[in-house]
Image (spheres, rainbow, N blue to C red):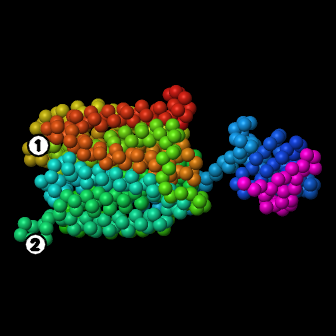
Amino acid sequence: MASRVLSNSDAGVGIGSDYVRGGHDHIFASSSTAAYLSEKEIRVIGYAATVTNTHGPAANSDVEPCARTLTNFVASSIEAPGSTEGGPVAQPPAETFPEGGLEAWLVVLGAWLALFSSLGILNSLATFQTYVSTHQLMEQSQSTIGWIFSLNAFMCFFAGVYIGPVFDKYGPRWLVLAGTMCLVGSLVLLSFCTVILANSAVPSPELWHFILVFGLMNGLALALLFTPSIAAIGHFFSARRGFATGIASTGGGLGGVCIPLMLQSLFDRVGWGWGIRTLALVSLILSGLSNILLRSRLAPALDASTHPDVRIFRNVPFALTTLGVFLLEFALFVPLTYISTYTLSRGFSASFASQVVTILNAGSVVGRVLPGWYADKIGPFNANIIAVILAIVSCLVIWLPTSMLDSTLVSSSDGDDRNSAAAAPVVLFALLFGFTSGSNISLIPVSIGRLCATTNYGRYYATCYTAVSVATLVGIPIAGKILIIDGGEYWGLIVFTAALYVGSLVALFAAKASVIGWSLLGKF
């Protein structure tokens, strides 16, 4: 790389105001120092440099801030001798973040709106599955139907391997616009996958219709909204990133509360078709607004590649974190998908089964905000580990014993759910698991952000979730197969879920230990 050489053993080297901004020219003086400056790097050999002013004391107020800035930059550029051939290589100055302000919080609002539409649907998969399994696809097994929704979650995360690098290079605007169009289009098409009367000339919807429209197209739309929304927040927050991401993630939680309630009411009143079309209209409004508000702060990396780079898995903490998130998401989607059918199997009414999904998502709203706040104090990895421990407790201490109760003792014979004693453990599990799942969803992006530079965040985040997408693809069908093997009993599915969480706990703690050592209480 061609560089300008500035050296002077005694007299010093003049640096114009293009390099150090101020009202006067300043002097970069050094004894026994040679500095090589170029647009992209500074190499310093010798002793620390100082900044002086040749225009007298009157200009000291201008010089001192510049002196501190330049001296700090030079000091941060010096590495151990021999670390790089030809001399130590400078590191870029420490990144600074707004940590607030109108523009930053408008980006959080834009992310909230996008996540309401995307993660809100992802958190409502149980509502979709319950309806189609009792109407359009009632002749299909739970394991077969599960492929529709596992494919939806898979596409949401897998597509991020290309969406993340595109975000790093071009920003969020075109990605969110494409996601909005794809989301609305998929929902409109899905609305026509309705029950057809037996004497109608129109053919009934088949499994592949749902796989194509909801599994593939809708899943891609969620990825185009989800990935850039989370990544954009990282451009504006660092110290408060956990809190800001948690605030934005409540959009997905509230979407998971509102969408099932809205659909349940609309299905009863106007049917499947107009119920889904109403959801499409709401998604168009919210996602359209998010497209106006979302933006990136850092200049686009125009020289960056839009292709994924698996070499980042050589980063051991990142590889262990990805393994932990893989097992976590594998486990997380099992209760999210099967909690509604589980409730029905215990003898509760369809209305209560839908309410349980809403209760779970209400718990996740709290879980997205509170852990995000204390994650900034104790570290995102520590907060995530605590959430995983609570998830294990909720599965083994609450859900498993409840599943072993005789279903005839759960509710009244007319399905009115008057047995509050039987309903209480189900509600308690939904609240606690909702809290932990919300915590995981909001803390994972912040944890990944601790392992990379902000300019590479989109690539790291997308690469992680591309690997994780495999878990979401096979997790739901595997859980459905376990359900079939156990004759419709849920104890095996619950133990399977808890075991996955235990594996995730081990991997996340190992990732933390690989960075700061085996310190149980160390902040990270």
Image x and y of residue 227, in percent: 44, 55
Q: Give the mark toward the camera: 1 or 2.
A: 2
**Magenta extent:** 1-25
Between 104 and 509, the one nearer to me in the picture? 509
Task: Give above or below for 490 relative to 278.
Answer: above
Residue beneath the point at 36% across and 32% down: 502
Residue 358 placement, left or right of 520: left
Q: Residues within 10 Å of mark 1 (few under 14, many from 20)?
A: some
Magenta-drawn stretch, dominant element (helix, strand or loop): loop
Image x and y of residue 176, in percent: 44, 64
Task: Give above or below for 134 relative to 284.
Answer: above
Between 217 and 232, the one nearer to me in the picture? 217
Tell me the SS state at disc 1.
loop
Q: Quadrant of residue 102?
A: bottom right
Residue extending farthest bottom: 201
Task: Give above or below for 83 relative to 19.
Answer: above
Residue 292 placement, left or right of 62: left
Residue beneath the point at 25% across and 54% down: 148
- Mark 2 highlights which residue? 201
Image x and y of residue 201, in percent: 10, 72
Residue beneath the point at 9% across and 67% down: 197
Residue beneath the point at 53% across and 36% down: 524
Tell me the SS state at disc 2.
loop
Image x and y of residue 440, in percent: 41, 43
Residue 182 placement, left or right of 457: left
Give the numbered dot on residue 412.
Answer: 1
Whether residue 211 is visible to the viewer of this picture, yes or no, is: yes
What is the three-letter code of the residue carrying label 1? Ser
Q: Quadrant of residue 248?
A: bottom left
Check contact, mark 1 vs mark 2: CB within 8 A.
no
The Cα atoms of the two marked residues, 1 and 2, are separated by 42 Å
Residue 20 is inside the magenta segment:
yes
